[in-house]
Image: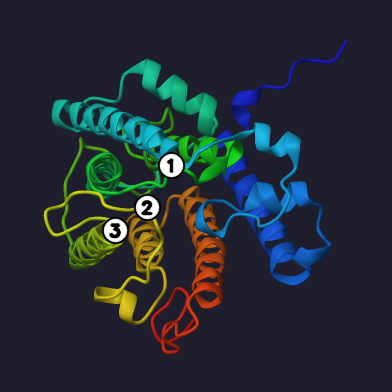
Amino acid sequence: MFAWYDLRSINLINFLFVNLIVTVVVLGGLLATIEKHLPTAIRQTFRYGKHALKGSPDRLVSLLEVPKAWFKHFYVFAALWSMTGFAVMMETYISGKPAPDYVVAFLDTMATNKRLVRTTPTETMIAMTLITLQCLRRFYETWFVQVFSSKLKINLSAYLVGYIHYFGTVVAILSQAEGFTRASPVSLPTNGYRFEPSVRLSLCIGVFYYAWFHQYRSNLILANLRKDQTGKVVNQKHSLPTGGYFEVISSPHMFFEIVMYVVLFGVLHRNSSMVYVLLWVLSNQLMNSWLTHQWYVENFPNYPKQRKALVPYVL
């Protein structure tokens, strides 16, 4: 008889993010190099929104498509999930006691029962506050600011990835935080929770806020392309965005998404799971921005040549 393998010894969160990274890198690379030779099903699955597949679609893949407006759904989840994580964290650190056993058991299941303490209460509080603010703002944007085209679709897999991303990010942040593991802290204070601000953390907060604000501003510019001066939606067409960081890159909202996750990694740099979160965001936003830039160039003959795809003046 074979003994059951203890699944709690596997970091399922790392496993999920690694699979997402590999999928995006491999399929994205194929699209960038030999797209015309790929089966329609693969191209249609990976492309969505304004840069969706042109031509005859694959019938089976079409059955697995949902309205792009469903993006709203996983921001409802993200807002509720991040606030739950924030509330548990605050209760733990304010009470000065370890996290409830059911929380630790859940983290043991999702991020291994061999977890060690790698981040301080200060770092954890900052990271959880920042990701919660981001989730709440994205919830507000998708429900009250953005205008989704009623005709555009996304693959069900892309829709589900949104849930995986926010679920995994919150779990990753808490998984190696002091008070949330069964192991004793290593090279960290053991006489209760101490909160120690630093210049590094202050700079991280400042950079995050800058990116957070300018991502909102970029999404507002995109939404206003479909509204009149009174804020009424008057069309669903794609127009050429101008103003703000759109003057130098095609996808400033994606650029600032990367900046925010670079900051989160900077705050939690000892957390071994955060590198996978960052690499996933980087690979996903890089491919989406490349497709978006390509679409702009193809559809607007006079598209400004100085605009880069993702990184101002560089890429």
Q: Residue at x 45, y 73 (%)?
A: 310
Please report whichever mark, 3 or 2, sits nearer to the chain's N-terminal start.
Answer: 3
Q: Are marks 2 and 1 in contact (CB under 8 Å)?
A: yes
Q: Which residue is mark 2?
A: 236
- The amino acid sitting under disc 2 is Gln
Task: Identify the secondary structure beneath mark 1.
Answer: loop
Give how far apart the Cα atoms at labels 2 and 1 are.
Answer: 8 Å
Check disc 3 and report its element: helix, strand or loop.
Answer: helix
Of tags 3 and 1, which is closer to the observer?
A: 1
Total numbered labels: 3
Q: Is residue 268 left or right of residue 196?
A: right
In this view, 253 is above or below 231:
below
User: Which numbered marker is on residue 250?
Assistant: none
Q: Measuring 36% from the left and 53% from the top, which residue is drawn there?
A: 268
Which amino acid is tagged 3?
Answer: Asn
Residue 179, horizontal then vertical, whole percent? 31, 32
Q: Nearer the viewer, residue 27 or 221?
A: 221
Q: Quadrant of residue 257?
A: bottom left
Q: Residues within 10 Å of mark 1 (few under 14, many from 20)?
A: few
**Residue corresponding to mark 3:** 219
**Gap in Å between the C-alphas at discs 3 and 1?**
18 Å
Question: On the image, which quarter does residue 180 sit in?
Answer: top left
Q: Amino acid at mark 1?
A: Ser
Q: Earlier in the sequence, mark 2 or mark 1?
A: 1
Find the distance from the CA under tag 3 to the CA under tag 2.
Answer: 15 Å
Q: Residue at x 60, y 38 (%)?
A: 157
Mark 2 lies on a secondary structure that is loop
Residue 150's disc is: 1
